[in-house]
Amino acid sequence: MLKKGDRGAEVSELQKKLSEMGCEIEVDGIFGPITEWAVINVQAMFGYLVDGIVGTETFRLVEAQHRFGWNFRRRDAQRWALKAAGLLKKEEKPSANPVSSRS
């Protein structure tokens, strides 16, 4: 488990992955407020418990999305994250007979 205040190689590895995923974060091995912010944003984007702590599930999420190539900077990053988390309903096809509003 990694959390704010932790230091070391595991924190550096996490920061490297978050940086490669588009977070503006310095890889310094110190789990400070910017690393915590990045973790919170990843957790929120994918519908995880938002606590800023990298436990087993958040670690797996970062690993998987890093391998998959997910990136904060993509214009559709949030939509992609919501789909991956199963939180976005399939888009409905437009109706053949749309209802129009009349005054």
Image (cartoon, rainbow, N blue to C red):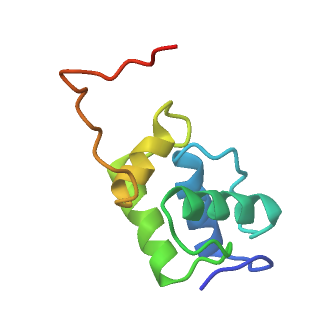
Residue toward you, 29 or 54: 54
Left or right: where 6 falls relative to 49:
right
Left or right: where 16 falls relative to 84:
right
Q: Is residue 21 above or below residue 8?
A: above
Residue 45 is at least partly visible in this image: yes
Residue at coordinates 80% horizontally, 78% vertically from top-left?
Answer: 5
The percent position of residue 56, horizontal first and vertical second, equals 47, 83
Left or right: where 37 falls relative to 2:
right
Please identify the quadrant where the N terminus is shown: bottom right
Q: Is residue 94 above or below residue 73?
A: above
Residue toward you, 32 or 83: 83
Residue 28 is at least partly visible in this image: no
Q: Is residue 93 above or below residue 68?
A: above
Residue toward you, 72 or 97: 97
Residue at coordinates 54% horizontally, 55% vertically from top-left?
Answer: 45
The percent position of residue 72, horizontal first and vertical second, equals 55, 42
The quadrant where residue 97 appears: top left
Which residue is situated farthest in the top direction here?
Answer: 103
The percent position of residue 33, horizontal first and vertical second, equals 81, 64
Residue at coordinates 74% horizontally, 70% vertically from top-left?
Answer: 31
The percent position of residue 81, horizontal first and vertical second, equals 43, 51
Which residue is situated farthest in the front direction here?
Answer: 103
